[in-house]
Image (spheres, grey):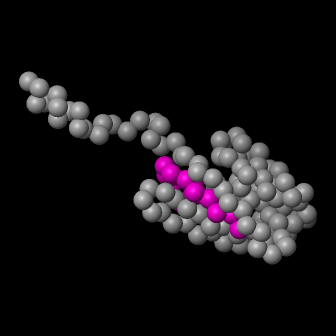
Amino acid sequence: MLLPLTLAACDPGVPTAEDFIPDYKGVETVLLDGDLVQFNVAMTKALSTDDVVAYAECAAARYTLIRGYGFARHVRTNVAQEGGIFRGDAVYTISPSLPRGLKTIDAEVVTAQCVERGIPTV
């Protein structure tokens, strides 16, 4: 009778809700040139690359406010996964007024949305 119990102990079990809660590992901010900023983010338990992109955007929004600006424009984001860790490398320009381009963000609005969604900022 011990054999079935021993095998059951090796069963990885059913995933719980905690298995799907993203674990944010931190942000590294690199000022590239004046208003051009790179954000390197890392996280585990991302459901998709969209989670990593959102984490980088939240970091960019808060950083923009910290620097005294109100807007940012997305330049690019690269996402890679290795060994269960998702890494994002995003570049934004920050500015006091709404920049030209399609992928602009209002830093105050995005930061508030990040707080509501539980995504950490810088």
Tell me if residue 104 can be seen: yes
Q: Which residue is drawn at 55% across and 53% down?
A: 43
Q: How many marks?
A: 0
Figure quadrant of residue 35:
bottom right
Q: Which residue lies furthest to the left in this view?
A: 1
Identify which residue, 57 or 41, lies in the foreground: 41
The reply, left or right, for residue 89 in relation to residue 19 is right
**Magenta stretch: residue 42 in it?**
yes
The reply, left or right, for residue 75 in relation to residue 43 is right
Residue 89 vs 3, above or below: the answer is below
Figure quadrant of residue 100:
bottom right
Residue 110 vs 33, above or below: the answer is above
Tell me if residue 56 can be seen: no
Q: What segment is highlighted magenta in the picture?
A: 38-52
Residue 42: % across, % down: 57, 57
The reply, left or right, for residue 21 in relation to residue 2 is right
Residue 34: % across, % down: 85, 73
Q: Residue at x 37, y 39 (%)?
A: 15
Q: Residue at x 55, y 46 (%)?
A: 23
Residue 48: % across, % down: 50, 56
**Magenta stretch: residue 5 in it?**
no
Identify which residue, 121 or 100, lies in the foreground: 121
Q: Which residue is drawn at 76% across and 49% down?
A: 111
Figure quadrant of residue 88:
bottom right
Q: In which quadrant will I find the N terminus?
A: top left
Q: Which residue lies furthest to the top in this view?
A: 1
Identify which residue, 104 or 18, lies in the foreground: 18
